[in-house]
Image (tube, rainbow, N blue to C red):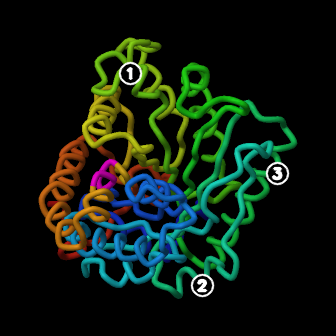
Amino acid sequence: MDLRTTEQKRKGLRAVADSRGIIAALAIDQRSALRKLFAKAMNVEAVDVPVERLAQFKEAVSRILTPHSGAILLDPEYGLPAARQRAKNAGLLLAYEKTGCDKNVLGRLPQLLDRWSVKRLAAAGADCVKLLLYYSSTNTAEINDAKHAFVERIGAECVEAGVPFFLELVSYGEGMEDKGVEFARIKPEVVTQGMQEFSKLVYRVDVLKVGLPVNLVFVEGSPIAGKEILHKRREALSHCRRAASAAQVPFIYLSEGVSNEAFQFGLELAAEAGAKFSGVLCGRATWQDAVPIFVNQGARALDEWLLRDGVRNIQNVNRCLAAALPWHAVTAPGLTSWPRRRKGKGRP
């Protein structure tokens, strides 16, 4: 029997999926990235952004948007009040890693939150636990071996606690700009190799959370395409297909900070390629434009924006999930039976 999928873990995965087994979730576990958005809107340094403002923003997003989403991903540092504001039928994922990394330190090695464990996250209400890992197949064998061992330990901890393990892979190239053309050229290979590596049973990963294998700024026809095109549409489809075929566990896409329109384009590209993805954990593509509204116009204006634009953004993404494959259809043979539908878990 595949040790990744115990009955306890199935319960956790059911809690964050809809009635079809599709994970249509909202992500707002951002901490340093959210601080930067606030700092820009407030015209202050990131360290000067009050924690209370971040927590208040997360609460509003959770309260207003989770009725339209199957689950929400939050952090235990600023997000627990928001977790209590989520809709009754929305599942909860909690992040386990410290935010950000020092890009000047070779390897971008991961660190866990102090005073937290998988069991403590579950006790705080988490149905599933998420770990973000910066990963590049171009790194040295020594660096990647350390990361492999790190993920093995977290996977074992999740098995012991019976909590599903979501591994978020953030691809990069050492010494390259994350959004630059140099890394965009090798991103398809880096994403593909990461998905292949962490599908191995030794890691006990239940769901991979990944970006598209192409940077949409360099894809023909993308709404955010620049002057330099690296990938014609046919080539982009091929990269999506190849990366998806490397995964042996369910995987979902993250929006990587692009606009809602661009993320829709990316999901449509993946669907056309026949990528067997099992949903999304969509973050900034849903709510990032609300930050300056909150900063400049206040809480009431934030609520109005979320009720109008935020809900529309979620619905736009949800419409792109018709081609998604249920998570339980990707698990090991003999473990794919789907229990009775849970009342009230359908997507809008």
The relative height of residue 290 versus residue 139 in the rendered view (above or below) is: below
User: Which portion, as a residue range, is magenta?
Assistant: 285-289
Mark carried by residue 237 = 1
Residue 41: x percent and y percent? 38, 55
* Residue highlighted by disc 3: 146
Residue 116: x percent and y percent? 65, 80
287 drawn magenta: yes
First-in-chain label (1 vs 2): 2
First-in-chain label (3 vs 2): 2
Q: Which quadrant would residue 42 be assigned to in this image?
A: bottom left
The relative height of residue 101 versus residue 227 in the rendered view (above or below) is: below
User: For the residue labelled by badge 1, is the local secondary structure a helix, a strand or a loop?
Assistant: helix
Neighbor class of circle 2 (other Cα within 10 Å; few <14, some 14-19, many 20+) is few
Point out the residue furthest to the bottom here: 123
Left or right of 155: which side holds 150? Answer: right
Query: Label 2 amino acid?
Result: Arg
Q: Residue at x 30, y 81 (%)?
A: 85
Q: Residue at x 59, y 56 (%)?
A: 132
Residue 1 visible at all: no
Q: CA distance from mark 1 to mark 3?
A: 33 Å
Secondary structure predominantly adopted by residues drawn in magenta:
helix
Left or right of 201: which side holds 221? Answer: left
Left or right of 290: which side holds 54? Answer: right
Which quarter of the rendering shows the N terminus?
bottom right
Query: Label 1 amino acid?
Result: Leu
The front one of 52 and 59 is 52
User: For the residue labelled by badge 3, is the local secondary structure a helix, a strand or a loop?
Assistant: helix
Q: Residue at x 42, y 66 (%)?
A: 73
* Residue highlighted by disc 2: 120
Residue 287: x percent and y percent? 30, 56
Q: CA distance from mark 3 to mark 2?
A: 25 Å
